[in-house]
Every structure is written in C-alpha cells, then in structure tokens.
Amino acid sequence: MDDSSAFLRFFCSQRTHQYGDLYGSMKYNAGSAIFTMRTLELRRPPKSAPGKKVARAPAGVAKAPKTKKNPLFEAHAKNFGVGQDIQPKTDLTRFVKWPEYIRLQRQKVILNQRLKVPPAIAQFSHTLDKNTATQLFKLLNKYRPESKQEKQTRLTQTAAATAEGKAKTDTKKPLFAKYGLNHIVALIEAKKASLVVIAHDVDPIELVVFLPALCRKMGVPYVIVKGKARLGTVVHKKTAAVVALQEVNSEDQRELATLVSAAKANFSDKFDEHRRQWGGGIRGNKSSQMLRKRAKAAGQSTTAAHITKL
C-alpha cells in the first residue's frame, strides 16, 4: 500500500511539472488522481466569419429521411416530343374536343375578325353603350306585353263578369312594346314607331340587315343593342330580333325623349360614317408575330396597328 501511494505522488508531481502550465493542475487526494482543467487555459477553435445565423428547425418538424438512389438507374434529360416521355401537367383547354355548337360559335367569331366584313353587316358591331342600354331596358320592361298566364287570368275574369250579367265596360287599350319582324316593318313604313331596338347577333343577319337603312329613310330613330336573348326576355320569348316602342305614358315621355336623342346621336347621325366603314381584317397573334419578325429582319419599323390590320 505504501509503495502504490508513493508511486502515485511521484506520477502526479511529474505530470504537474510537465503539463500544469498548459492544460491544468494535478492534485493528489488519498489514493485518487484528479486532473482539473482550468477554463481560462482551454483552447477553442477560431470563430467563423460573421453572417446570418440559420434558424433552427421547429421541434415538431422531423427531418426527411434521405432516399437512397439505385445506381442502376441513370439520370437523363426528358424528351417531351410526340410519343416520348409523359408530358408535365399543364392546362389542356386548347386541346379539348368541344361540342359542335361551341366550335361553330368560335369559328364564326374568328371568321368575322379575319375576313373583310361589308359595312352593312359591320355596323352591327357598333352597339349602344352600357349605361344607355340599361336605361332603355328599364323603360322597355315597363311596357312588357302580357304573358300567357296574365292573358288567361284576364279572360277568365271577363268571362265570369259576363256570366254574372255585369255590363261590359270599355277599357283603354294598354300600351305594350311591339315585337315581330313583319309587324315592326309595317310600323316603320307607316312612321308609327317611336323607337326601334335591333339585336346585334341575329342569325341569319339578313333578317334585319335592311332595318337601319329603312329606319333612316323613314326618319325613325333606331338603336342596336347586345343580345337577342335579352330582347326576348322583354316580350316573354327565348329570343327577339327587334322590338319597338310606339306610344308611352305621359310620365315616361321625358325618358323616351332622352333615349331618342341618344339614338339619333349614336346611330342616325353616324349612318354615313358606318356605311363607309368596313369591318374585320384583324390578324391573329401568330400572323402578327411573323410580320414583326420579318420587319425586324429587314430593318423596317412597322406599327402594331399596321401589322394587326390586313
């Protein structure tokens, strides 16, 4: 026991003499050697360059495990040609096979833009502005003709009154908006129509293509509005090509006069201008881009309006 304690004291004294100044001091306590590190002498690694610290991941978020790739599968660029790799998910609206009636609608719109449209047909693209059209339909809705249910109710009441032996009273003829192409043509020729409302999307257009010229010849104000379906709701039909107002009540005379003045300013007075103005002739995007490239290669400066028009 004495030999072992003497050996430990000798070992501690030698180590303290050799390393105490650099790494710490050695102490001997009753059969144990304790090596105490002095924190002031602890060597630390140099600090990294100043910069933003990366925020720690939230405690609840687990790191995604790394998937091992099979070395037998080699990475290569995808080829999205016809019959090659699977196409990425994109909007395929352009390639949808639409129903026939939708395709016909779209083809008709494109043809009207591309082809030269005669002035007699092109004038139907100039429609009444939205605010004036709203006022016009408010007035037309006041003079909607009676529906089938209203007519049946009126006839039933009249028949019941006749059966009871009541005296028949003469009532004033109600004021309604007129519809029906032949009927309105007769009113225009007789100069009895106060305002004629024509739909811009009548198909075939030949049904109403002569009406603006006829109205101008007879001095009857006319307007062209959007929507044969909207005109149809006024007269309880699916569609209506033309509707006319003949007479209105005294409280609506001022509103009708305002609409008539707007109709003359926008349509009757501009008839000669519309008669000389052709429509259509608008190029598509691909054709316009091709002309721009050609002009740029030739060193010519072409305006966008000149390129888009044929």
Image (spheres, rainbow, N blue to C red):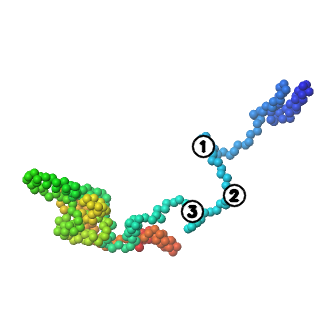
Q: CA distance from mark 1 to mark 2?
A: 30 Å
Pointer 3 residue: 86
Q: CA distance from mark 2 to mark 3?
A: 23 Å
Is residue 87 visible to us here?
Answer: yes
Residue 180 lies left or right of residue 80; in this view the side is left
Identify which residue, 249 or 307, lies in the foreground: 249
The secondary structure type at the circle numbered 1 is loop
Residue type pointed to by label 2: Pro
Label 2 sits on residue: 71
Residue situated in front as seen by the camera: 18 or 138:
138
What kind of residue is marked 3?
A: Ile
The quadrant the N terminus occupies is: top right
Q: Residue furthest right?
A: 3
Whichever of callouts 1 and 3 sits on the residue coming sooner in the sequence is 1
Residue kind at label 1, given as amino acid type: Val
> Can you identify the residue that label 1 sits on?
61
Q: For this view, does 136 lie left or right of residue 16?
A: left
Above-or-below relation of 112 to 29: below
Write the residue at 57% across / 67% down. Answer: 83
| Among the 4 quarters of the image, the one containing residue 142 | bottom left
